Image (cartoon, rainbow, N blue to C red):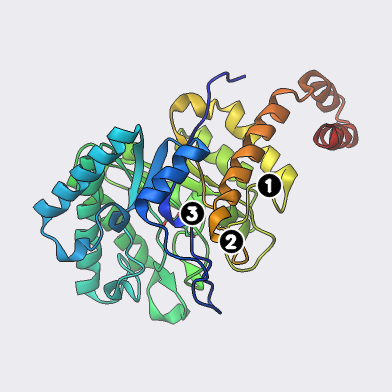
Amino acid sequence: MSSASYRFSIGPWNIGRGADPFGPPVRPAVAFDDVLAAAVNLGFEGIQFHDDDAVPDLENLSPSKIVAEAEAMKRKLDGLGFVAEFVAPRLWEHANGIDGGYTSNDPAARRWAIERSKRAVDVALALGCDLIVMWPAREGTAVRESKDPIAASAQMIEAINAILSASPRARIAIEPKPNEPVDHAFVPTIGHALALGARSADPARVGVLIESAHAILAGLDPSDEMGFALAAGKLWSVHLNDQNGLKFDQDKVFGAANLRGAFDQVRVLEAADYAASGAFIGFDVKAQRTQAADSATAHLATSKAVFLRLVEKVRSFPKQTAAQCIAARDYEALERLVLEHLLAA
Ligand code: XUL
Ligand code: MN
């Protein structure tokens, strides 16, 4: 079993303002420097970026100015002992991406999406990281007949190849999600993401980021999704969180809805020695709308504490007894063993 220690990462959007579709923000905006201060307090060493988290207003900057600003950000991170984990092109908030980026029906929007993604590669390299996270947010449909799924698949591969060709160092971690903001996404599961990667120009540079809630929204078990990716050497980041059934993307505290499911995710990460791979543990969790501003990082602290408690639970699990249950095919006894272990102080 792994003795390596885990590295944790945070994205600025994880300290949100409490807005939801039915109400405006309820907390003041958190300055990026305050996100870094929170990361220090929480013991997080990696920073996850959208391209415009790292270089605000990049749509209005020249490519050389974008790189200069990203380099300045890297100096700030270096000074505080942080590393950039990844950069994700934020296509879904821009007007050009209103009907999707890579799979938009508008060829000019598709060209924009690819150009912006190449700029995200520039930002990543200037920040000293090589990982691009592709969350294909609006790559899908609200009206099924509005797009051609065969063409969409080819367009996704075209975009992946364009990003790979931007730098021989660039790697892509696709973060699938089955719905929201679209009704049906073109890349809903890890299987879809890995299949696209396999069909790309350089499969060795395409992997995945698994978010627990996204797998649950697809009706899948996050730990099995992780196992599938780990078996292929493709799990390059995780967004651990939780989700209470099939509804809007809740980004709940890790383990808050299904502690046993969280245990199983930690179990598979431990079994694969994920920590030793150097990849980060991120928590894509959201502070509740009711939370006061001065304690709006509690959801991150709790997620990390639960994760570390579950690492201990996995390491202290009575594996020999479990193996005997399995050998005897006494899965009722195994069920009891797991539940007693989770309930034990
Ligand atoms: C959306 C989601 C995003 C990505 C990064 O559901 O998970 O936060 O992780 O943009
Ligand atoms: Mn996520």
Q: In this view, does 97 lie to the left or right of 279?
A: left
Assign a secondary structure to mark 2: loop
Neighbourhood count class around disc 3 (C-alpha, 10 Å): few under 14, some 14–19, many 20 upward = many
Q: Is residue 47 left or right of residue 95?
A: right
Q: Determine the residue positioned at 59% across, 66% down.
A: 289
Q: Mark 3 points at which residue?
A: 14
Q: Do the residues labelled 3 and 1 touch (CB within 8 Å)?
A: no
The amino acid on which the numbered mark 2 sits, given as a three-letter code, is Ala
Q: Position of residue 252 (x, y in %)?
A: 62, 56
Q: Mark 2 points at which residue?
A: 292
Query: Camera-side residue: 23 or 4?
Result: 23
Q: Compared to 29, does 192 lie above or below?
A: above
Q: How many angstroms separate mark 2 from mark 1 (CA)?
A: 22 Å
Neighbourhood count class around disc 1 (C-alpha, 10 Å): few under 14, some 14–19, many 20 upward = many
Nearer to us of marks 3 and 1 is: 3
Label 1 beta carbon less than 8 Å to ligand 2: no
Can residue 340 be spotted in the picture? yes
Q: Compared to 279, does 57 lie above or below?
A: below
Mark carried by residue 12: none
The amino acid on which the numbered mark 1 sits, given as a three-letter code, is Gly
Q: Position of residue 109 (x, y in %)?
A: 24, 72
Q: Name the residue under label 1.
A: 255
